[in-house]
Image (spheres, rainbow, N blue to C red):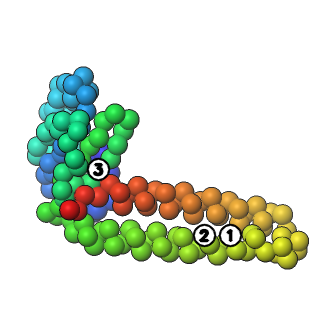
Amino acid sequence: SVRAVRARFRISPHEPLAVSVRASEADWDALASQLDFVESVGRVSRLEQLSQDAPQPTGSVGEVFGALSLFVHVGDIVDLEAEAARLQKQIDKTQKECAGVERTLANEGFLAKADPAVIAEKRTKVEELKATEARLREQLEGLSRD
């Protein structure tokens, strides 16, 4: 997760990052037993446990894996407001493109004249655009910039 966040925000692999974890005691114990490995592979400067009801730390990017929530602190390195604006712009662009393809598919004249392969391609494009939008929304929701 830390390495994925580094790649997404183009953070140097040499930059140490703090990570907070919201996990059950059993999951935390398993993670803590591998602390040296986690710190070396992820270049984690600090790994801390959060209580189950603790909010996402400000300046962090969150990822959820079942009952385990990881929060990578990037607020001092990445402008999260600019990242949120960039993601929203991508979401808007994706929605606009999807609406255009859906309008084409709603056109009876197009459906009557178009090759079935082209229609299938347009339907696939709509599914891909919706999946992209969902992924972008997850990324946007994972930012804590309060």
Q: Which quadrant of the rendered structure holds the N terminus?
A: top left
- Location of residue 106 in the rendering, given as x and y in whole percent from the top left corner: 76, 71
Q: Residue at x 23, y 49 (%)?
A: 56
How many other residues sit within 10 Å of disc 1, few (<14), some (14-19) or many (≥20)? some
- The image quarter containing residue 129 is bottom right
Q: Nearer the viewer, residue 77 or 108?
A: 108
Q: Residue furthest left?
A: 45
As helix, strand or loop, the secondary structure at mark 1 comes to helix
Q: Amino acid at mark 1?
A: Glu
Q: Quadrant of the C terminus?
A: bottom left
Query: Dot 3: few (<14), some (14–19), or many (≥20) neighbours within 10 Å?
Result: many
Which residue does the numbered mark 3 point to in the structure image? 62
The label number, if any, that marks residue 102 in the structure image: 1
Q: Position of residue 88 (x, y in %)?
A: 40, 70
Asked if marks 1 and 2 touch (Cβ < 8 Å), the reply is yes
Please tell me the numbered disc located at residue 78.
none
For the residues labelled 1 and 2, the Cα–Cα distance comes to 6 Å
Residue 92, compared with residue 141, is above or below; it is below
| Residue at the limit of the structure toward the right, as seen here | 112
Task: Please state if 117 lies on the left or on the right of 70 as rendered.
Answer: right
Q: Is residue 63 visible?
A: yes
Q: Secondary structure at mark 2?
A: helix
Label 2 sits on what residue type? Answer: Cys
Residue on which the image places disc 2: 98
The kind of residue tagged 3 is Gly
Residue 40 visible? The answer is no
Q: How many marks?
A: 3
Point 56% across, 75% down: residue: 96
| Residue 63, x across and y down, in percent | 32, 47
